[in-house]
Image: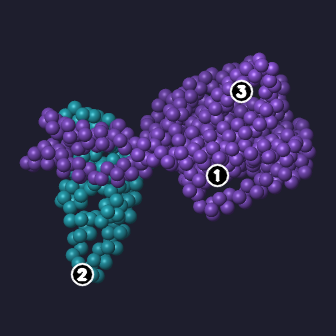
Amino acid sequence: MHIDKDLVAASATPLVLGILADGESYGYAIVKRVNELSGGRMQWTDGMLYPLLHRLERLGYVEASWGTSEAGRRRKHYAITQAGRETLADRQQQWSVVADALKQVWQDVQRPPAVVEGWA
Amino acid sequence: MMSTNPQLEAQIDQWRGYVQRRRAISASDIEEMEDHLREQVTDLTRTGLDDDEAFLVSVKRMGNLDEVSREFAREHSDRLWKQLVLVPEPSDGGARSWRELGVVLSLAVGAGIAVKTGVELFGDETVVMRNIGLLVLPFLAGYFVWKRKLTWRVGAALLVPFALLAVVLNVYPFDPDGSTLFLAASHSIVALWALVSVVYAGGRWRSDARRMDYVRFTGELAIYFVLIALGGGVLIGLTLGTLGLVGVDFEPVLESWILPFCVPGALIVAAWLVEAKQNVVENIAPVLTRVFTPLTIVMLLVFLGVFATTGGLLDVDRELLILMDMVLVLVLCLLLYSISARDSLAPPGLFDVLQLVLVVAALAVDAVTLSAMLTRIAEFGFSANKAAALGLNLVLLVHLAWSAWLSVGFLRGKHPFDPIERWQTRYLPAYAGWALVVVVIFPPVFAFA
């Protein structure tokens, strides 16, 4: 399924922060996790994740550290900070307001509300 | 598992080379993305794709490199700054740079003609010196108007404050020997410099990133200008010496033609050089701050030690205040230029601690002198010079004190580096504001003396 670019961009920050809230991770694993969570229906442009991660780092929402992969390559790991958790909670509230409103709209136009729940 | 397929390795090498050409993507970002690419390839080959197919799919998923690189550039505008500086590739048209050189040289000559005409028309040297900024800086601004393809509206909006400064400087009934004249003339250059910043930023003067670019530009311009002046000084010295040997007096030509044309011309040319080759000096700025920060700390500690042992300041007058202003400006420059070159993602390091020590030492020295000064002023009252020096001191003090406070927070891990950087750029208009006060309000308050 193709998902609109703006929607992907808007949901990227809470998704990344949410995934990192589960424990520290690195770029490829984050993309894989997004694929799993959306059942493969959300396809990110993988390269775009890194500028986003750097922005979150600059804003102080995540912390980065260099580690090593199983194959012995250098790998950058990201962990969420306290400020990141606060932002995540904030975003979660915003999204649930949006999702609630959408749910009611979907009911009005009599479409299955299941579409929305993936975003909540 | 790391792939050992030589063909795949060659393809990844090629991809890496391709990404490396993007200035906005740094080496460590490439490493990060390469790790991603390899993981993706490994996963895809596990699902049955051969290496070639897996590589193609992985690169495709990585996305259009132009778009990714633009995203990086948006996040790291400092890298874009370095990109601006790249010597233009030959394919990029030699015509454009020739035309630019033509524009630069005509503006440089124009600035020279303006100064020379001023000298001839006014005759009086103090009148020329008072108007020097008004004569030269429009040509510098003109270069950026051309370079940034600025709209006429921005230009016209800038003409209003420019005209106001010109009127104030020339219509106020200054006492020719008074200090308000000198104060107004010197501070008008700061105000004009702030106007140039609007043109430099292409009208987007509110942007923090553009302001930081202007700070970098100012520093680099100063360095280039000094370098050009040194070179020019050598040439003048050689000419003077050689012509002196054959009995030709070169000095009248030097004073009435060469200096009025070359000094303003050098400023315009230096601005063009900075625009064209910023990164040559960009790399020197952090080196300079790294060298001079520890040395300045030593200097300040010596000051404090001497103040403490001699038990007070003997000769407390405005020269001391001006000296202190200069110390604070020096510390501010060290701070500003190391911040302008600092990677805002880097964790706090030893140098950040040193910088905090520097600022705190400067504040301590300033506090000692200020307290001595204030009692003196309370006794003998204000003069224009004292008030100007004291005002600048306070403006600097606020800037440095809040920087120190933010540094403490950063070092203790309370917030990222970003607020420190933003504070520097947000505070800059205060200097323009203070300069304007000295130009416009001081003369009438101190009766133009």
Type of colouring: by chain
Do we see residue B173 in this rendering? yes
Which amino acid is tagged 2? Gln
Which amino acid is tagged 3? Ile
Q: Where is residue B252 shown, x and y percent of the image?
A: 82, 31
SS under mark 1: helix
Discs 1/2, front: 1
Quadrant of residue B424 in the image? Answer: top right
> What is the CA distance from the residue labelled 1 to the residue labelled 2?
62 Å
SS under mark 3: helix
The residue pinned by badge 2 equals A110
> What is the CA distance from the residue labelled 3 to the residue labelled 2?
87 Å
The residue pinned by badge 3 equals B236
Q: Where is residue B243 shown, x and y percent of the image?
A: 75, 22
Residue depicted at x 73% and y 20%: B242
> What is the CA distance from the residue labelled 1 to the residue labelled 3?
29 Å
Residue depicted at x 85% and y 38%: B377
- Chain hosting mark 3: B
Residue depicted at x 82% and y 53%: B168
Per the rendering, the mark at residue B142 is: 1
Front residue (pair A101, B260): B260
Q: Where is residue A14 shown, x and y percent of the image?
A: 34, 56
Q: In cyan, which chain?
A: A
Q: Seen from this angle, which residue lies furthest front?
A: B246
Which amino acid is tagged 1? Gly
Q: Where is residue B117 shown, x and y percent of the image?
A: 80, 46
Mark 3 burial class by Cα count in 10 Å: few <14, some 14-19, many 20+: some
Residue depicted at x 29% and y 82%: A108
Do we see residue B352 in this rendering? no
> As drawn, is B379 to the left or to the right of B411?
right
